[in-house]
Image (cartoon, rainbow, N blue to C red):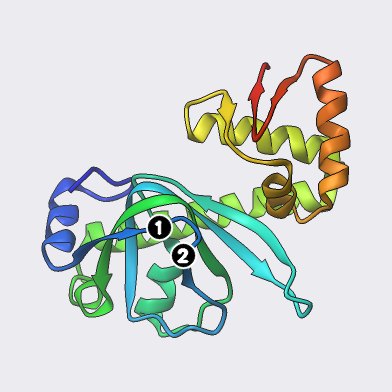
Amino acid sequence: MGNFRFISPELAEQLCSMGKRVQLEKGTVVVRPGDKLEEFYLLESGTVNFYRIDKMARKQLLHTLNAAEACALSLVCSLFGEESFLQAEVKDDCVSWVIPKQVGLKLMQRPDMQRFIMEATIDGWKNSLTAFDDVAFASLSERLLSYLIHQSRIHDDRMIKKSHSEIADDLNVSRESVSRLLKTMEGNRVVQLHHGHLKVLV
């Protein structure tokens, strides 16, 4: 059991003792829009992307869940009986604790559980609003640079092991647009391009 943001060690130990530890492979869709959730997730390692899916089945990245964080979507939907409105997809191989909703409901009267739910939910919304601001107000070049810097920070590695197509999918834009901008960034010494990956220089 690891340390998780917003959860006291005592609460984390109690939650994990009544849950199960699972491994999730890259590409696994954990949650789909419309799902009724019977559990929530505490991510020990890896990353999970959350997408909004439109009527044409196009994906827009809204939020990335990182190691030591709780999945606010599964937390709220399971405990309050709401259907999922996002798709959660494993981006990098994960280890996660899966906690039955009955465990969360049983502990709802604890102040540290209430604080955990509130802080995890607020943090999730803040991250989603940041992604919304990028789509609504920023140019594609600004969005791309923000995305690359964010990826290098969450992985603590300037080398981003993603293809142009994978980056384009995350940003919901064409691969050609991403490739063109990355080439310009390379000329401006912002990135260094390699086959199948790139290095952030700023």
Q: Is residue 116 above or below residue 20?
A: above
Name the residue nearer the viewer: 124 or 62. Answer: 62
Residue 184 horizontal/vertical position (percent):
88, 25
Name the residue nearer the viewer: 48 or 130. Answer: 48
Q: Residues within 10 Å of mark 1 (few under 14, many from 20)?
A: some
In the picture of the structure, the residue carrying the numbered disc 1 is 25
Residue 80 horizontal/vertical position (percent):
39, 81
Q: Quadrant of residue 103?
A: bottom left
Element carrying mark 1: loop
Q: Give me the C-alpha separation between circle 1 and circle 2.
A: 6 Å
Question: Amino acid under label 2?
Answer: Thr
Q: Residue at x 46, y 55 (%)?
A: 26
Using the image, tell me which numbered label, if any, was put on residue 28: 2
Q: Residue at x 70, y 45 (%)?
A: 167
Q: Is residue 128 above or below residue 3?
A: below
Using the image, tell me which numbered label, if any, was put on residue 160: none
Name the residue nearer the viewer: 193 or 103. Answer: 193
Q: Residue at x 62, y 40 (%)?
A: 162
Q: Residue at x 65, y 56 (%)?
A: 61
Residue 129 horizontal/vertical position (percent):
65, 54
Q: Is residue 68 left or right of residue 122?
A: left
Element carrying mark 2: loop
Q: Are marks 1 and 2 in contact (CB under 8 Å)?
A: yes
Q: Is residue 21 left or right of residue 133?
A: left
Q: Is residue 88 left or right of residue 189?
A: left
Question: Amino acid under label 1?
Answer: Glu
Q: Residues within 10 Å of mark 2 (few under 14, many from 20)?
A: some
Viewport quadrant of the C terminus = top right
